[in-house]
Image (spheres, rainbow, N blue to C red):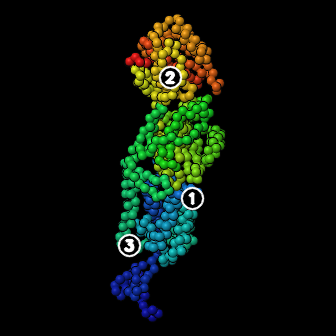
């Protein structure tokens, strides 16, 4: 029989004229190609997708470790991507995330990765490693528009997580097709590729990413965190050690902050309790828009106890309303919180807000901690477009290292003017108040005070007498008259005691101040030669215990090393 193309058909298994058997996908001796059935393995495709996800996740980690939580400016729009966020006491311990323009850049890289590789060589890194290729359903090479279409539909195939929608679609289309929604729309399929030399080279980019993640992680952990300029210019990096820190120790507290920051005082007042008086404030400043302020306030009455754990829904809703009003009063919008935390072992609350300051978009992290009638406030503010990452790390450093040293019984020792005594470390030395000696005064020598707040303090003063004084009933009567003269109501008659090794008299009186608060005075008059020492301990009912303990500590430790 004559065949139209001049060939004689070969029986199955029969060699052709060159002694070779036809193989699918090979050319016959006349240059014609025998079509090969397309193999579409599901397992390899899933494995390839996981390799691509691993590669892109590694890229995310690298960017996060390099730029931290810094937000590059994109106007008023704000976006954040978080891969891992582990917190302790409400503060981030591990936070792998990207914000602002960095997050937008990463989101743009995702479709670009798939489109560029599949449009150029038909394979992503994962597909090349496992010998897969994107082709038309009929085996031809897909067009750029087809690749673009299947790339865009990854948004749908990827829902709700890890390509679950696409996986279900591939199962539904059966073994012969294995197409996800993007393949169905673009007329493409993922098939086994013909053997390609140097396929193992695809391992190189994967290895580079993994090594880079490990290297940057070690660098960040051992001493090379990035530091960002807050002027709106490009990021700059300084060789600042991750462990380099300065320690603030004063006012009965201590905490660490970045060594390169400057101590300052800022006109910032933020408190949520019923404030009676601001006790002290200090700040660590990176620049005008990026800083951390720490302050303490005296409350009246004491702050209510905050349960550590999950707040009841009704109570949390009420707190959210209160904080929303509180933030609005300061020109901020509540973004997150309140969240229960502990700071220095004290119960507290943490909130986050955002607003503008002098026309600059800023964000605040506020922590409020309570210890009886004292409220401690940490206010961390940063400009969204520049110092976010550095300020957030510094804020976490302050909150994690914050310690109230005075509550642990720490004390300071005053040594001057020939005397020495101890007083609470958390009290602020300085200031003075009037005191009334009982002896024949020639001149006032000196005085020193340590204050818990305006109405709770202790003071020691020394006077030069015209002649020595011996304690007698007449002197006791003089003490009573002296307290009457300064407006005190006598609460306890004068008693003889020793202030250190110096004999003296102790009396107590009371009076009402302008705020109609009842004030109690404990006054000690001690005599040594021609010198009279007057100790005055004044307290309100709310702080009676603290002042009495401080007063007793001073009386016990008072020593005269050299008569003035």
**Which is more foreground, mark 2 or mark 1?**
2
Closest to the observer, 320 or 46:
320
Q: Earlier in the sequence, mark 3 or mark 1?
A: 1
* Residue 245: image tag: none
From the image, tell me which residue sits under label 2. Answer: 459
Residue 36 placement: quadrant: bottom left
Residue at image x 47%, y 70%?
116
**Which is more foreground, mark 2 or mark 3?**
2
| Residue 86 visible somewhere in the drawing | no
**Dot 2 and dot 1 residues touching (CB under 8 Å):** no
Disc 2 element? strand
Disc 3 element? loop
Residue at image x 50%, y 18%?
535
Residue at image x 46%, y 60%?
56
Residue most toward the top?
A: 473
* Residue 75: image tag: 1
The span from disc 3 to disc 1 (Cα, nearest Å) is: 48 Å
**Which is more foreground, mark 3 or mark 1?**
1
**Dot 3 and dot 1 residues touching (CB under 8 Å):** no
- Say above or below: 380 vs 558: below
The span from disc 2 to disc 1 (Cα, nearest Å) is: 55 Å
Q: Earlier in the sequence, mark 2 or mark 1?
A: 1
Where residue 561 sits in the image (x, y, percent)? 38, 18
From the image, tell me which residue sits under label 3. Answer: 196
Where residue 438 sits in the image (x, y, percent)? 52, 13
Closest to the observer, 309 or 442:
442
Where residue 64 sits in the image (x, y, percent)? 46, 55
């Amino acid at each position: 029989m004559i065949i139209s193309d001049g060939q004689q058909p070969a029986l199955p298994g029969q060699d052709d004229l060159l002694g070779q058997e036809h193989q699918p996908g090979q050319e016959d001796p006349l240059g014609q190609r025998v079509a090969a059935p397309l193999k579409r393995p599901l397992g390899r495709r899933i494995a390839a997708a996981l390799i691509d996800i691993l590669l892109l996740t590694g890229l995310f980690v690298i960017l996060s470790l390099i730029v931290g939580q810094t937000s590059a400016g994109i106007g008023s729009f704000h976006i954040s991507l978080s891969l891992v966020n582990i917190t302790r006491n409400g503060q981030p311990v591990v936070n792998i995330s990207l914000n602002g323009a960095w997050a937008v850049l990463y989101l743009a890289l995702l479709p670009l990765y798939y489109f560029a590789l599949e449009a150029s060589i038909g394979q992503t890194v994962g597909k090349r490693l496992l010998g897969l290729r994107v082709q038309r359903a009929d085996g031809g090479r897909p067009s750029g528009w087809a690749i673009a279409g299947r790339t865009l539909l990854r948004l749908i195939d990827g829902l709700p997580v890890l390509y679950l929608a696409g996986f279900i679609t591939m199962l539904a289309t059966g073994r012969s097709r294995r197409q996800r929604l993007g393949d169905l729309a673009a007329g493409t399929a993922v098939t086994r590729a013909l053997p390609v030399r140097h396929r193992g080279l695809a391992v190189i980019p994967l290895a580079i990413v993994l090594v880079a993640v490990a290297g940057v992680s070690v660098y960040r952990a051992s001493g090379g965190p990035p530091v960002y300029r807050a002027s709106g210019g490009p990021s700059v990096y300084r060789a600042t050690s991750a462990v380099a820190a300065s320690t603030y120790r004063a006012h009965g507290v201590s905490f660490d902050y970045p060594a390169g920051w400057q101590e300052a005082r800022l006109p910032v007042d933020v408190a949520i309790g019923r404030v009676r008086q601001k006790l002290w404030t200090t700040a660590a400043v990176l620049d005008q828009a990026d800083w951390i302020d720490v302050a303490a306030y005296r409350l009246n009455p004491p702050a209510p106890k905050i349960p550590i754990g999950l707040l009841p829904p009704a109570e949390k809703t009420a707190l959210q309303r209160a904080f929303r009003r509180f933030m609005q009063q300061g020109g901020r919008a509540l973004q997150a919180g309140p969240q229960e935390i502990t700071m220095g072992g004290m119960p507290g609350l943490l909130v986050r807000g955002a607003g503008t300051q002098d026309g600059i978009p800023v964000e605040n992290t506020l922590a409020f901690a309570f210890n009886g009638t004292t409220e401690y406030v940490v206010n961390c503010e940063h400009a969204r477009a520049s110092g976010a990452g550095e300020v957030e790390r510094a804020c976490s450093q302050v909150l994690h290292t914050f310690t109230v040293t005075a509550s642990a019984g720490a004390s300071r020792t005053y040594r001057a003017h020939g005397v020495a005594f101890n007083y609470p470390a958390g009290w602020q030395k300085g200031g003075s108040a009037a005191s009334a000696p009982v002896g024949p005064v020639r001149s006032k020598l000196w005085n020193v005070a340590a204050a818990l707040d305006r109405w709770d303090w202790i003071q020691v003063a020394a006077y030069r007498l015209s002649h020595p004084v011996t304690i007698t009933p007449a002197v006791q009567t003089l003490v009573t008259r002296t307290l009457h003269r300064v407006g005190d109501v006598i609460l306890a008659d004068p008693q003889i005691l020793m202030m250190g090794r110096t004999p003296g008299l102790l009396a107590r009186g009371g009076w009402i101040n302008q705020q109609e608060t009842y004030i109690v005075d404990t006054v000690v008059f001690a005599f040594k030669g021609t010198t009279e020492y007057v100790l005055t301990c004044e307290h309100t009912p709310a702080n009676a215990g603290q002042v009495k303990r401080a007063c007793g500590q001073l009386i016990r430790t008072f020593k005269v090393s050299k008569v003035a």
